[in-house]
Image (tube, rainbow, N blue to C red):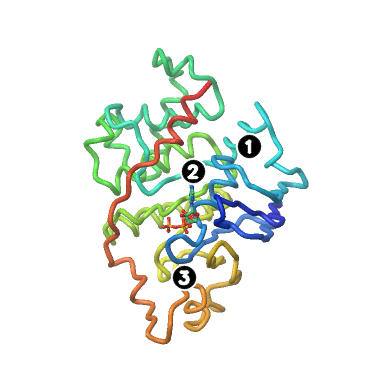
Amino acid sequence: MRIEAVRLTKIFGTARAVDDANFVISQPAMIGVIGSSGAGKSTLLRIINRLGEATAGQLLVDGQDVLALRGRAKRRWQADCAMIFQQFNLVPRLDVVQNVLHGLLARRGTVSTLFNLWPAADIDRAVAILDRLGIAEQATKRAEALSGGQQQRVAIARALMQDPRIILADEPIASLDPMNAQLVMDSLRAIHDQDGRTVIANLHTLDTARRYCDRIIGMRKGRIVFDGVPAQLTTSVAREIYGADASFSEAATSTSIEQAPVPSDDTYAAQLLAD
Ligand SMILES: Nc1ncnc2c1ncn2[C@@H]1O[C@H](COP(=O)(O)OP(=O)(O)OP(=O)(O)O)[C@@H](O)[C@H]1O
């Protein structure tokens, strides 16, 4: 699969949240997107998944502009690129397996879920995916009873259930402690290595991007100002991305810094549940 972003632009009012972004992904990759708050990282992922519409530009996937798709074809594309969010976006009162099975909504209708009519083969697959992520023993618990790190792995399992070609992760570890952050990043890396799926993760922390990603895209004020391998990301380049002065230190973007929780974004759940 070849993905090419051509002059992707998103304007909110007068703000250019994504400004003329161009990149090519010619083979499965693990890509980290970095940049300070407001740089446009989330907006970029949402455009790719069609949760948000671009103002201009194209996203060519094997030559076809997926931003122009409508109806069923658009939903098929959305099923091909699963989203993972900082706040997990699980259904709290449902058990873990049910949450994972919801990944199938991207590929199928909603009728079966209304009646909880899941074929045994689907349930077996959901449990196998949970097992792969090391949380099969949590399968019958309510999602809300799990720790944040476990909930994020359930969200990854839900994403895998829809068998996507791409996983888009929007700040997947920003709400997690360092140990759980590592477990979640290890899982995403394994999914890329073992399945050959492309993973694009927005990351607050440079050290995480360096450690887990083969390629890093740096955004500043909507523009892509860096696109290269971690070794090319020198301190002076990092400073340019973050718009920081000489006092900038990488430690300031370390995973050990706790992020304040942000309100959950339930658009994704709404999209999955939509007809
Ligand atoms: N729905 C919206 N309406 C208006 N402006 C928006 C909207 N969503 C994002 N923006 C603006 O677009 C710009 C980019 O925001 P975006 O959330 O993509 O940045 P980000 O790099 O993901 O930041 P963060 O790391 O804080 O999540 C910001 O200036 C933001 O205020």
Mark 3: few/some/many CA within 10 Å (<14, 14-19, 20+): some
Residue placed most toward the observer, 267 or 98: 267
Q: Please, which residue is most extreme toward the left here?
A: 145
Q: Earlier in the sequence, mark 2 or mark 1?
A: 1
Image position of 224 (left or right of 37): right
Alpha carbons under labels 3 and 2: distance apart: 22 Å
- Element type at mark 2: strand
Label at residue 148: none
> Which residue sits at x=37%, y=53%?
184
Q: Which residue is disc 3 drawn over?
A: 210
- Element type at mark 1: helix
> Which residue sits at x=51%, y=57%?
41
Q: Earlier in the sequence, mark 3 or mark 2?
A: 2
Q: Which residue is disc 1 drawn over?
A: 77
Instruction: Give percent across and percent down for residue 153.
Output: 36, 45
Alpha carbons under labels 1 and 3: distance apart: 29 Å
Q: Amino acid at mark 3?
A: Arg
Q: Amino acid at mark 2?
A: Met
Q: Please, which residue is most extreme toward the right here?
A: 63
> Which residue sits at x=37%, y=70%?
253
Quarter location, residue 182: bottom left
Instruction: Give percent across and percent down for residue 186.
Output: 40, 57
Instruction: Give percent across and percent down for residue 228.
Output: 60, 71
Q: Which residue is disc 2 drawn over?
A: 83
* Contact between labelled residues 1 and 2, with CB atoms less than 8 Å apart: no
* Contact between labelled residues 2 and 3, with CB atoms less than 8 Å apart: no
Q: Please, which residue is most extreme toward the bottom here?
A: 246
Q: Earlier in the sequence, mark 1 or mark 3?
A: 1
